Amino acid sequence: MSVNETLQKRQHIRRIVFILMALSVILPLIFKIGLPLKTTKEVRDVFEFIDSLPEGSAVVFSFDHDTATLPEMIPLAEALLRHSFRKNLRVLGLALLAEGAAIGDDNFRRIGNEFGKVYGEDYIFWGFRPQVTVAMLGLGEDISRVFPSDYYGKDVQSYPVMEGIDSYDDIAGVISIADGDMPVHWINYAQARYGVNVIPAVTAVMATTMYPFLQSGQIAGLAAGLRGAAEYEMLLGKPGRAARGMDAQSSAHLLIIGLIIAGNVLMIIERRRK
Amino acid sequence: MHRKLPMYICFLFGAFMLVQFFIPHRTSTAIYETILDWVQIIYAFSLLVGVALLIKHHAIIATRPSAKDRPYSGIVLGGIIGMFIFGIFFGRGEDTAFLWVFKYVQAPMQATMFSLLSFFVASAAFRGFRARNTQAVFLLVAALIVMLGRVPVGDMISGFIPKAADWLLNVPSMAARRGIYIGIALGTISTSLRVILGIERTYLGGSRG
Amino acid sequence: MDIGTTVAAILTLAIYSFLYRDNPFYKVAEHLLLGVSVGYFLVTTIVTTIMPKLFIPVFANGELSYLVPGILGALMFLRFSRKLSPYSRIPLALIIGVGSGVAIPAYMQAQLIAQLKTTMLPLDDISNIIIIAAVVSVLMYFYFSREHKGLTGAGAKAGMYFLMVFFGSTFGYTVMARVSLLIGRMQFLLGDWLGIIK
């Protein structure tokens, strides 16, 4: 077989794999199977943490991600926001990555409207701050110094929702919705120094990096990826997009496992031939 | 002096921030808060420098008649200018052009760009994920257990699979990651000390002063 | 179906066209993405950080002390000048100094002491023994001041196997993450755009 033919064959196989991948996701989305989903302890811990907070407690949502991971991040943020609003918590928001600012503000308004919450009275979005380290440390000293005004340029202290909230001492927990290692920074700078509770809601890629902190008790729980969001939706009793995507998640995983096995079988056959 | 002054500044501010942690006096706390405040402003300028460099790069290409990618650089500049005008002059809240472009142009494209990786992961799983030696077998088995154990179908096949995935994540994988974290902490502490003391100066654009 | 959803769907398909081969539709979408992302970033940085932290305190409130970080920040732009570029290192040195100063106690507390403390587990459980063995052996693997021979070598080798388990688990989760992103985009195309699924 010539080099050209080999390349063409490879390209052909590649395209077949791409089509199989697309089908493995599309078909279960159209023809629902409804596989049962069990909740894990990590996600239940997050749920119970928020559920145990008394009405009026303040929680901070930090949108520490960009638009690349929206399909994973938004279901997580939505589920956690719905729970916080349902519990009548005071919801405060910020972004440590620039794109998180528009995402956070949009989600706050959308989910806030669902529950009839009023901006400035029940929730507020502070905006974006670069240099995560100093921003996290600054919030432990004086929030209004880090964020003198909110996302819309109005004095932060003029909003009723901010009454009695000056630093981490007045905050029940920081929920870092992150697609990178931002929760680790929250642990290093906010949890270790100021003792604030940190709850990571991260992409699945970041899940394994959070387990050491889960075991050491440095984080209150862990919700990771679309699966974490699906579990949270189940705990809320309102299955949404994430839960509906779990069938597709299962079939795509089965396809990839099948591809790995097929690749290895081919390798063994080729070795035997030689 | 060009190198010494930054080194002294680095030492002064680094040493102060370190000492302040152990001696949180009222005066030192006030200075500490001021420094935190200042750094946010200074850092924001560094981001603008990055943007300026990118604009400069594409402006050069867009104005060079012989450049092949000239139209594409024009699109980049058009995007920057458009968003700048929308955001600065017409607001960023609900029902603004800025948020519309963000929601319907930027966000879907960026998310789609990353979702392309699922196809490449599938392709790589077939072509590259081979159990060639014992180490690769460990990697492969761990991956298969987690992949199956973290989706509903794994539980349907056997209740043992999710339990195995849980154990794997909470024991050997967690402990290995902890080892990495401890290593990172030791490395960060020593590098930070070297930076403060002026031994590590690569950020000045060279290793020798 | 609103116009925004259709625009988003067309751009989504333009990006997916790369799966067939690189093409002008993909390139236009790619560069448009770069442009609007940078534009967004520029506006957000100016409006939510530079304005409230620098311009308003200085020009509206008369807090002139904020001119100091403003000037230091502006020095960063001197990197564009061949002659004056060394001065752009001054604000950089300040940021690096501050970052290093705060990092030492933070990493010491959160990642070194806390993580070591929680590894001191009673040896009455097989999982606990594995945790201790894994942490020690992974640290041995990263210990390069001594040749990996004898006991150190055996420890480092064991560390490598534990690392492989970690990488494998992470790969498993990475697959999960990438698939989730595809599910999200397909839910958008089939649901929000075409209305085939709910």
Image (cartoon, coloured by chain):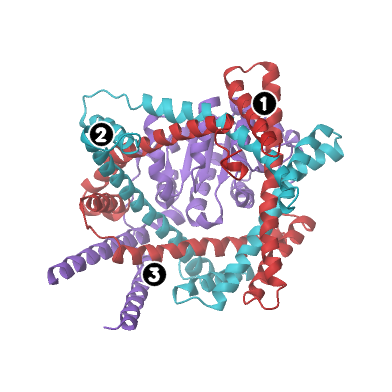
Chain colours: A purple, B red, C cyan
Residue at x 35% of width, y 52% of height: C171
Which disc, if any, is residue A22? 3
Question: Marks 3 and 1, Cα distance to the nearest angstrom?
Answer: 53 Å
| Vertical relation: B105 (above or below) B51 | below
Q: Amino acid at mark 1?
A: Tyr
Q: Residue C187: where, in percent of width, then height?
A: 47, 64
Q: Residue A156: where, in percent of width, then height?
A: 73, 36
Chain identifier of the residue bearing label 3 in the image: A
Mark 1 surroundings: few (<14), some (14-19) or many (≥20) residues within 10 A: many
Residue, disc 1: B32
Residue at x 22% of width, y 58% of height: B132
Q: Amino acid at mark 3?
A: Ala
3 vs 2, front mark: 2
Residue, disc 2: C152
Residue at x 71% of width, y 32% of height: A145
Nearer to us in this view, A27 or B164: B164
Q: Amino acid at mark 2?
A: Thr
Nearer to us in this view, A263 or C10: A263
The answer to whether residue A151 of the structure is visible from this angle is: no
